[in-house]
Image (cartoon, rainbow, N blue to C red):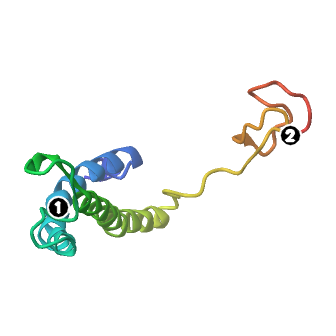
């Protein structure tokens, strides 16, 4: 059982499994929320005889409706979905990994910029640019 637990707690396995399972689980819930709550609220903003919040590009053709409310709903769905993923999965995972002494989702390593080519991902201790080969102190 210990080997199985260690396998599951490997960073890459946990991250991929969590991303897949949680995405499938919460996608339907959040989509339903935005379609049943947010979309009707956005549609109520437009005129009562319209298809919702947006513009009819060609009259008489409901397929020629530029649905701004649908776009706003999709943006809200994305933001709510990412917030749920962060607070339900990432925060607890970081806490478990911190107890194990592993930094998960930490800050990136410090870097500096080359004055000649302006590449900005050089290690702090570099004395020569790996892109342009400048021997100047970077």
Q: Which mark is residue 76?
A: none
Residue at the far top: name it.
133
Mark 2 is surrounded, within 10 Å at the Cα level, by few (under 14), some (14 to 19) or many (20 or more) other residues, namely some
Residue appearing at x 69%, y 41% in the figure? 121
For numbered disc 1, what is the local secondary structure?
helix
Image label count: 2
Q: What is the x, y in percent for residue 101?
A: 52, 61
Mark 1 is surrounded, within 10 Å at the Cα level, by few (under 14), some (14 to 19) or many (20 or more) other residues, namely some
**Mark 1 highlights which residue?**
31
Query: From the image, which quarter does the C terminus lie in?
Result: top right
Residue appearing at x 19%, y 67% in the figure? 34
Residue appearing at x 23%, y 62% in the figure? 69
Q: What is the x, y in percent for residue 21?
A: 21, 52
Residue appearing at x 55%, y 58% in the figure? 106
Left or right? Give the position of 17 relative to 117: left
Q: Compare residues 56 and 89 and report the one nearer the observer.
A: 56
Q: Which mark is residue 138?
A: 2
Left or right? Give the position of 86 relative to 21: right
Q: Compare residues 2 and 31 and report the one nearer the observer.
A: 31
Q: Earlier in the sequence, mark 1 or mark 2?
A: 1
Q: CA distance from mark 1 to mark 2?
A: 49 Å
Position of 15 relative to 69 (above/below)? above
For numbered disc 2, what is the local secondary structure?
loop
Q: What is the x, y in percent for residue 44?
A: 17, 75
Left or right? Give the position of 9 relative to 131: left
Q: Quadrant of residue 123?
A: top right
């Amino acid at each position: 059982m210990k080997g199985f637990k260690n396998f599951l707690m490997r960073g890459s396995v946990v991250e991929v499994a969590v991303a897949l399972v949680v995405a499938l689980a919460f996608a339907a819930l959040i989509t339903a929320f935005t379609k049943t709550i947010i979309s009707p609220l956005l549609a109520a903003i437009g005129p009562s005889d319209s298809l919702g919040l947006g513009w009819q590009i060609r009259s008489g053709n409901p397929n020629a409706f530029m649905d701004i409310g649908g776009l706003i709903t999709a943006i809200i769905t994305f933001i709510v979905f990412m917030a749920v993923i962060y607070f339900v999965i990432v925060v607890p995972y970081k806490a478990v990994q911190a107890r194990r002494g592993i930094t998960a989702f930490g800050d990136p390593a410090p870097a500096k910029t080359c004055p000649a080519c302006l590449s900005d991902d050089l290690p702090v201790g570099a004395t020569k640019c790996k892109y342009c080969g400048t021997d100047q102190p970077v």
